[in-house]
Image (tube, rainbow, N blue to C red):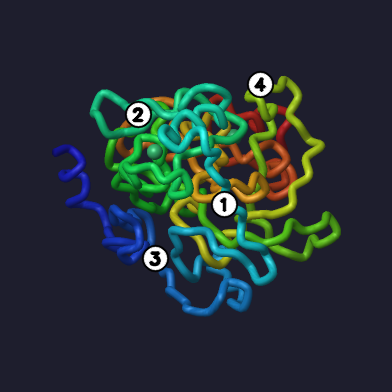
Amino acid sequence: MRVCCILQVRTLFSNDISKGKEAIPIVGVNDWDDDRLEIEDAGASAETLPLVRDKFGCPALQRYITEDERAPGIPEPEVPVLPEQFKDDPHKYIAQLNGGNLPYELASDGKTGILGSSMAMVYECGPWTGCQLGLSCPQAVTQRGCQWRLEVFKTRGRGWGVRSWDQIPYGAFVTAFHGLIRLALRDEDDEVDDTFVFNLDKRSDFSWDNQFLEEPDRQRDVKYVLDSTRVGSVGRYINHSCNPNCWVQPVLSRHGDRKMPSIAFFAMRNIPPMEELAYDYGSSYIQTRLDGQCHCGHAVCAFAGPSSS
Ligand SMILES: [Zn+2]
Ligand SMILES: [Zn+2]
């Protein structure tokens, strides 16, 4: 009820920025100024769309998508074949892929899948296993899409942000970062705006057998990136924080190509309604893209203090 009372004085400018593409509408709100988020729904392929910038110079989203797209020339990922001995129990194979255990457990509500901790890569049950449960399989969590009532809202001084009307429990899938899969660029290709680009790979802080690495694995061979500059989803509006409440989790579900995982966000703790969602962009992003200027505002901000300019 409290949330409804707040809404009465808020400026809601969109009932659903995804225009029906997400399972649950994502509202757009701005309490501070006249700025509006307008996603055109351009029909052209992402490769041919011009780069449009908003009045702050940020690349503007031109089409909302809920499935990653592939740039011309990017091969279709290979779908795994379920070994014969697992035909009667594909989840045994899913457990094996995940190092011995199934990745998700059901929360007490009986429907929310909970991922106990971050992993190098999560392998979900997908259509390729022949699982009879289909999308209702407890091991197909991210394939059902976002299950929370999210809103994109105007923050004070940090552009657009995202928050949820619902409490999101620890370990729950929050939403995904969708975009165009394209070849990773070389360092010298620095004229390209990479504000909304993710390297597609396992997590750098875990080895493939899910051992936590004190020193992040920097010798990675990233072949593809996920680019949300022109086409993307609500995940691109989630801000950075040095005290985040979400973690980034690569997930394989409908195919098995480890160079092209989906990018999902999971809750690092119980997130109360209306708390801004945030994840750690990594210090190199803050240093190179934001000149070391972090605006997260947290007392534990890694970039605040006397040494910061
Ligand atoms: Zn299944
Ligand atoms: Zn910070």
Q: Position of residue 152 (x, y in %)?
A: 38, 53
Do tag 2 and tag 4 residues touch (Cβ < 8 Å)? no
- Residues under labels 2 and 1: Cα distance? 32 Å
- Residues under labels 2 and 4: Cα distance? 23 Å
Q: Which mark is residue 79?
A: 1
- Between discs 2 and 1, the one toward the N terminus: 1
Q: Is residue 35 left or right of residue 187?
A: left
Q: Which mark is residue 299?
A: none
Q: Which mark is residue 212?
A: 4
Q: Is residue 213 visible?
A: yes
Picture quarter with ligand 1:
top left
**What residue do we see at 70% from left, 50% from top?**
289
**What residue do we see at 34% from left, 57% from top?**
22
- Between discs 4 and 1, the one toward the N terminus: 1
Q: Pick the quarter of the image with the N terminus.
A: top left
Disc 3 is placed on an element classified as: loop
- Residues under labels 3 and 2: Cα distance? 30 Å
Q: Quick one: label 3, few (<14), some, or many (20+) residues within 10 Å?
A: some
Disc 1 is placed on an element classified as: loop
Do tag 3 and tag 1 residues touch (Cβ < 8 Å)? no
- Residues under labels 4 and 1: Cα distance? 28 Å
Q: Which mark is residue 169?
A: 2
Identify the amino acid type marked 3: Arg
**Residue toward you, 4 or 214:** 214
Disc 4 is placed on an element classified as: loop
- Between discs 3 and 1, the one toward the N terminus: 3
**Closer to viewer: mark 2 or mark 4:** 4
Q: Position of residue 36 (x, y in %)?
A: 39, 65
**What residue do we see at 33% from left, 43% from top?**
132
